Amino acid sequence: MFGIDDLLKNLQVEQLDTLLFRGQTLRLPLPQVYGGQVLAQALNAASRTVDPQRHPHSLHAYFLRRGDQDRPIIYDVDPIRDGGSFSTRRVVAKQNGKAIFNCAVSFQTVEPGLEHQIDLPIEVPPPEDLEGDNELVGRLFPNTGLQKVLAIIPDGVVDLRSVNPRNPITPTIEKPQRGFWLKFNGELANDPALHRTLLTYISDWGLMETGLYPHPIGFLSKGLQAASLDHAMWFHTDFRVDDWIYYHMDSPCSAHARGFNRGSFYTRGGQLIASSAQEGLMRVRDS
């Protein structure tokens, strides 16, 4: 498996031309490229075509096709607009000449303004009181192939500690909300773009699963066809992902084989630093 240095290198996509970039895939035990990687690489590509004084504040993306982990991904950046304080970039990710993903990213020059936030709606135990997710998988499923399936992101990259995990083999019916603490390993550079990119990478982790919590169904359940359809991020202020961050997720609705999920990222001190939203395919087949 890979470590944090490998991930940092991977997310720094190779520049082929002024607006053309190429990314490689760090293999995970998944049938396709991890969506968070594509989101983060696209953000990295877009950010490198904008004045560094302008920081990304929102990203809106669509997953169009499954990515092939064995092939490079080409990121084509379209510099749609550079205004007085905002810039917009459109990014299309391609493999085999076909688009697998597209997104729009908006950047803003940092400026003061009115401030308010919604506080975290539940009491959350501190990360020190929780078991690491990969440690939990190892304890529940020792010496089984499930460890490779469930402990996907290495501890050497990011420490994940869920507050209310479900057993993936026998999922129970729960309220449509969940959350986990996250902290990337290593001492990271003081670069706002880097920390936004890494938060984007992990934002796809577990978000769609929230829509399954009200149902006795998990990602390992027979007959489930699941896939991310779109993804959005909003960055409210600067932050560091090598400090503990709590990712709170809820799912207001699912219908017509689609589940809608929302996420809020809070610092340990309770500051809301970023938000996410995603709709996912949740199709249950009889066979």
Image (cartoon, grey):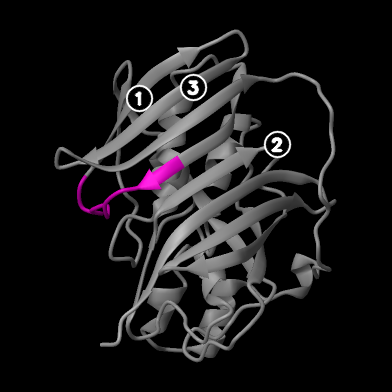
**SS class, disc 1:** strand
Asked whether the residues under the numbered discs 2 and 3 touch, taking CB atoms below 8 Å apart as contact, a structural biologist would say: no
Q: Which residue occupies 47% across, 62% down? A: 153
The crowd level at tag 1 (other Cα within 10 Å; few <14, some 14-19, many 20+) is many
Q: Which residue occupies 59% across, 38% down? A: 196
Q: Which residues are magenta?
A: 61-71
Mark 1 lies on residue: 77
155 and 67: which one is in front?
67
Q: Earlier in the sequence, mark 1 or mark 3?
A: 1
Question: Residue 236, which numbered label?
Answer: 2
**SS class, disc 2:** loop
Q: Quadrant of residue 112?
A: top right
State the CA–CA distance, disc 2 to disc 3: 17 Å
Secondary structure mainly formed by the magenta segment = loop
Residue 6 visible in the current orientation: no
**SS class, disc 3:** strand
Q: Indicate whether 249 appears above or below 24.
A: below
